Image (cartoon, rainbow, N blue to C red):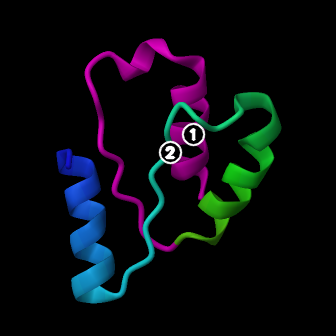
Amino acid sequence: MDQVAALASQLENRRGISTFIDNEKLERDEMIEELFNYIEATKIFVPVLSKGPADSRWYLRKITKMVEC
């Protein structure tokens, strides 16, 4: 289990906090509105950054939305 999955598991199992891990399996153009709706409904964000994410337009759109909310 990677560190992000372990963190999500701990939050959900020990604290009852719902988590969401965005991954490459999401269809980027089709899912962006659904993802933005999820972001808008979220009270707390804990972005976990990986190496080189700022090069991704998709990543920057998600972070921008989090900051706006």
30 vs 64, left or right, is: right
Residue at 53% from the left image edge and 31% from the top image edge: 24
Residue 63 spot, x, y in % from top left: 50, 39
The residue furthest front is 1
User: Which residue is pictured at 64% across the width and 71% down the height?
Assistant: 41
Specify start and end residues of the magenta stretch as a single range.
43-69
Secondary structure of residue under mark 2: loop
Residue 50's place in the image compared with 11, above or below, is above
Q: Is disc 2 surrounded by few (<14), some (14 to 19) or many (20+) residues within 10 Å?
A: few
Image quarter where the C terminus lies is bottom right
Residue 13 point in image, percent of width and height: 27, 82
* Residue type at tag 2: Asp
The residue drawn where x is 52% and y is 49% is 67
Task: Single out the mark in the foreground, 1 or 2.
Answer: 2
How packed is label 1: few (under 14 Cα within 10 Å), some, or many (20 or more)?
some
Toward which corner of the image does residue 39 lie, by quadrant? bottom right
Q: Which residue is mark 2?
A: 22
Tag 1 near tag 2, CB within 8 Å: yes
Q: Residue 54 appears at what percent x and percent y?
A: 41, 19
Residue pointed to by mark 1: 62
Q: Is residue 18 magenta?
A: no
Q: Is residue 34 above or below residue 29?
A: below
Task: Find the distance from the CA under tag 1 to the CA under tag 2.
Answer: 10 Å
